[in-house]
């Protein structure tokens, strides 16, 4: 079977976060390295080495952490950003001990560059509700540290610059997040629409098979009557006619909407073949379910397979359907690295919404996910 494209998309918001995180981590690594060099060359009296050395050591360790994030193209851990904010606050308040007087007087303090970088990191990593107060705190700490180092030093201009930086990056990230959220919503609607079309096509194919079967049976009965096989009414003929009429009435009464039954195994087999970059083995029992139930199974399986392709670190998965104790059970399994459900980022709605919420909102339906370092198994079920 030829599949023109996948029914799944990679989250645009997730891609934005990855891109901004790597860019910010790379910039923080570069700025951090430059700051260490500047602080080392500027370590002349009255700079206190007892203050400078431990603070720079912690700062250098954080810089190594950001370099690792940049190299591995990971999202920046929130704890790393929080630690960076704490160290920057300490450096700001300790400027009279770690920055040469000439640098303070010229406004070219290496700490100022770290303040800018910390404000950007906070806005990239956190939502405005947290990024704005953190940025204000860092800008205020820098101004306070300058004033503590020199009572005559101007703090209005640098504070104004930092506030403009904070405002600009927060507005930019807000606009980007909204735009990419709109893209995600559009792509999600596209995925749902494609699955709906698949369901409708399979439903029509099933109806055509039924019509063809009934047509052949009815013609066969009429042919026997026309050929004189039955010269008078018989119990056999009456039974066959009743069977044909019952089949026609059943076809007539079949709903045309979402509840019309379709072959779940055929739908899941098609879904499994449409995930890019993943070899999916299937073992599916023949089951016919209402169309709305089939759609929910299909969307949950689509999301589960997409998570395998994107996050499990493997290129193979398995989709199995069985009937257990009156329930139809579908399982998606992989042998990838697994994940901790309790530590999923709050924006990861795929697992919560498109798998767990999707099936649990279905009457007599449910879902469960078990994951470890040996792999992940997504179990979906529905009781007719």
Image (cartoon, rainbow, N blue to C red):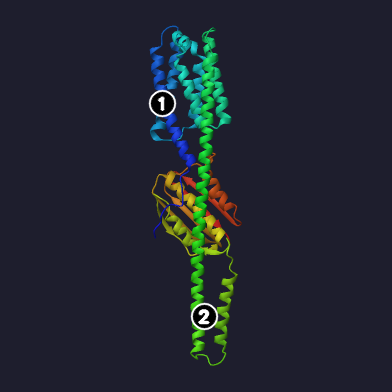
Which residue is painted at 48% across and 50% down in the image? 304
Inter-mark Cα distance, 1 to 2: 78 Å
- The x and y percentages for residue 374 are 43, 46
Q: Which residue is mark 1?
A: 29
345 sits left or right of 69 in the view: right
* Residue 176 sits above or below residue 48 on the image: below
Tell me the SS state at disc 1: helix
Which residue is painted at 54% across and 30% down in the image? 171
- The x and y percentages for residue 345 are 52, 38
- The x and y percentages for residue 104 are 47, 11
The mark found on residue 218 in the picture is 2
How many marks can you see? 2
Residue furthest out toward the right: 363
Residue 187 or residue 134, whichever sits in front: 187
The mark found on residue 16 in the picture is none
Which residue is painted at 50% across and 90% down in the image? 229
* Residue 271 sits above or below residue 30 on the image: below
* Residue 105 sits above or below residue 263 on the image: above
Residue 324 or residue 62, whichever sits in front: 62
* Mark closest to the chain's N terminus, 1 or 2: 1
- Quarter the N terminus occupies: bottom left
Observer able to see residue 344 = no
- The x and y percentages for residue 18 are 45, 36
């Amino acid at each position: 079977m030829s599949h023109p494209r996948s029914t799944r998309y990679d989250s645009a918001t997730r891609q934005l976060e990855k891109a901004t995180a790597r860019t910010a981590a790379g910039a923080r690594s570069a700025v951090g390295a430059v700051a260490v060099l500047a602080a080392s060359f500027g370590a002349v009296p009255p700079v206190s080495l007892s203050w400078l050395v431990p603070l720079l050591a912690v700062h250098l360790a954080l810089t190594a952490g950001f370099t690792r994030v940049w190299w591995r193209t990971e999202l920046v851990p929130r704890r790393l950003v929080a630690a960076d904010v704490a160290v920057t606050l300490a450096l700001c308040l300790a400027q009279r001990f770690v920055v040469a007087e000439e640098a303070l007087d010229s406004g070219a303090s290496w700490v100022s560059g770290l303040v800018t970088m910390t404000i950007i990191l906070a806005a990239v990593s956190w939502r405005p509700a947290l990024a704005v107060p953190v940025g204000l705190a860092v800008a205020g700490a820098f101004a306070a540290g300058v004033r503590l180092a020199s009572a005559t030093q101007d703090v209005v201009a640098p504070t104004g610059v930092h506030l403009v930086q904070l405002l600009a990056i927060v507005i930019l990230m807000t606009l980007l997040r909204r735009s990419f959220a709109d893209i995600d919503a559009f792509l999600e609607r596209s995925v749902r629409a494609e699955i709906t079309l698949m369901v409708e096509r399979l439903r029509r194919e099933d109806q055509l098979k039924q019509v063809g079967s009934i047509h052949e049976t009815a013609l066969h009965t009429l042919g026997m009557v026309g050929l004189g096989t039955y010269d008078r009414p018989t119990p056999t003929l009456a039974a066959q006619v009743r069977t044909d009429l019952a089949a026609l009435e059943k076809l007539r009464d079949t709903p045309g909407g979402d509840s019309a039954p379709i072959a779940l195994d055929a739908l899941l087999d098609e879904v499994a073949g449409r995930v890019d970059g993943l070899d999916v083995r299937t073992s599916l029992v023949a089951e016919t379910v209402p169309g709305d139930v089939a759609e929910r199974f299909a969307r949950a399986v689509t999301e589960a397979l997409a998570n395998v392709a994107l996050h499990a670190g493997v290129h193979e998965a398995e989709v199995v359907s069985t009937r257990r104790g009156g329930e139809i059970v579908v399982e998606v399994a992989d042998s990838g690295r697994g994940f901790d459900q309790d530590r999923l980022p709050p924006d990861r709605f795929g697992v919560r919404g498109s798998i767990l919420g999707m099936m649990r909102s279905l009457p007599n339906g449910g879902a469960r996910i078990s994951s470890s370092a040996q792999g992940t198994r997504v179990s979906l079920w529905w009781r007719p």
